[in-house]
Amino acid sequence: MSRSAHPAGPRHADVLPEGHYSAPPTDLNVLDHKVWAQTVGRGEDGVVTVGGVPVTRLAEEFGTPVYIMDEADFRARARAWRTAFGADADVFYAGKAFLSRAVVRWLEEEGLNLDVCSGGELATALSAGMAPERIAFHGNNKSVAEITRAVEAGVGRIVLDSFQEIVRVAHIAQSLGKRQKVQIRITVGVEAHTHEFIATAHEDQKFGIPLAGGQAAEAVRRALHLDGLELIGIHSHIGSQIFDMSGFEVAAHRVVGLLKDIRDEHGVELPEIDLGGGLGIAYTSDDDPREPHEIAKALGEIVGRECEAARLRTPRISVEPGRAVVGPTAFTLYEVGTVKPLEGLRTYVSVDGGMSDNIRTALYDAEYSVALVSRASDAEPMLVRVVGKHCESGDIVVKDAFLPADLAPGDLIAVPATGAYCRSMASNYNHVLRPPVVAVKDGEARVIVRRETEEDLLRLDVG
Ligand code: LLP
């Protein structure tokens, strides 16, 4: 990333310190819709609005920090996936990115299915009335209780992740007098170009059964012979925050190759393949994500072509986007508490949240953008690091960004693209209370996940 240009102004060293920043934008008041939710804009008074509601009003009504979700944007993105993949494919939203009962209802209304990966996510989906056959259950170590609950509820599929689990699910289903639809998750040996912790298709890791060495073929052999299981397909998820389509294409190619081997060995054509989630989103203006219709087209073409060559019926494709549906739809609204210029280095801006509401910067070195949203400013850009209130120097929300040099305590700033893997990975570190999620649409704002209270914390502390 470029870091050649640097701003003039009294609060800057001539040479910028080490960092990932690009040149400061020419106008810090402009909001780039690559990273901001669709209905976000700056009013004539300089205050940023979302869904027609000023952020100052949101802060007053709901407090800060707060995740603000643009419901219209969420629905539009969900619909874009649904439309891109059409009637011959299924879109499973990956609930791990962010799940709440309101989200489940939006998904149902927009025609998406749901991928859950724990008893908690399953309980949330069922309690919101999601049709169980539209739920896929994932995980590399589902407990017996979780599997039992999923089978009893009648989930549409369980994605098997190990040899032990093949037997475990078969026994549970059989003992409940059921035949459970399952897929087998395989690792296709693709090196996805993303952070090591979120790449999942290389062989040396905990998920899936390797295609290499015939292990996946052996898993299929076993699953086909167990009465409690109906093997409906093969699953591959190569990783997350991926921009390069070639990994998906190689994965699709190898999954179809396995379907062909299964047909040749068993005379069975499995009807479905799932190619997982992983499409990247823009966190800064430098990112250029692909659109759902591009990935739908690329996957459809490669699967169609490979199946034709292998003389296989084209299987029904499913995908599991999480981040790309919810990520861009929300921003985190913070109040600035302190502004601390460090001569020749940068200015530290402390906000009233931090690594407890966004662990991604500390965990993955993730990059984020930030803007002053409670007013416009014509002040010079200053290089800042936005940090939280936790007792840890790695408590960084935005590592390198520019904010106006007249930034002061009491200003509201917002970090966009925090809809995915922020609230869902939030913690109580330092007994800081997890922020609420507020959905905004057509001038109305409503809490969909309430703010945690000290009472909530103390209720768990039963010593
Ligand atoms: N399907 C499966 C089987 C997955 O494991 C995941 C994500 C998805 C779908 C959705 O992937 P997405 O479309 O959201 O990239 N906490 C990390 C991301 C971990 C992703 C885990 N699995 C982060 O904050 O970047």
Image (spheres, rainbow, N blue to C red):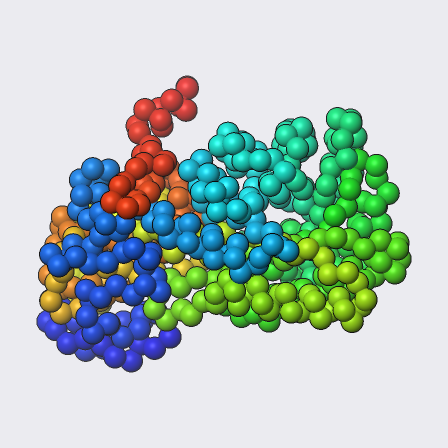
Q: What residue is drawn where x is 27% and y is 75%?
A: 23
Is 113 above or below relative to 125?
Answer: below
Does residue 186 show up? no
**Whole-percent x and y of residue 354?**
31, 48
**Whole-percent x and y of residue 457?**
36, 28
Q: What residue is drawn where x is 39% and y is 44%?
A: 423
Q: Quadrant of the N terminus?
A: bottom left
Q: What residue is drawn where x is 43% and y is 62%?
A: 281
Is 160 above or below relative to 236?
Answer: above
**Whole-percent x and y of residue 321?**
52, 54
Q: What residue is drawn where x is 20% and y is 43%?
A: 59
Q: Closest to the observer: 134 or 205? A: 134
On the rendered structure, is 362 left or right of 143? left
Total marks in image: 0
Does residue 291 show up? yes
Residue 439 sits in quarter: top left
On the rendered structure, is 147 left or right of 27? right
**Whole-percent x and y of residue 332?**
30, 49
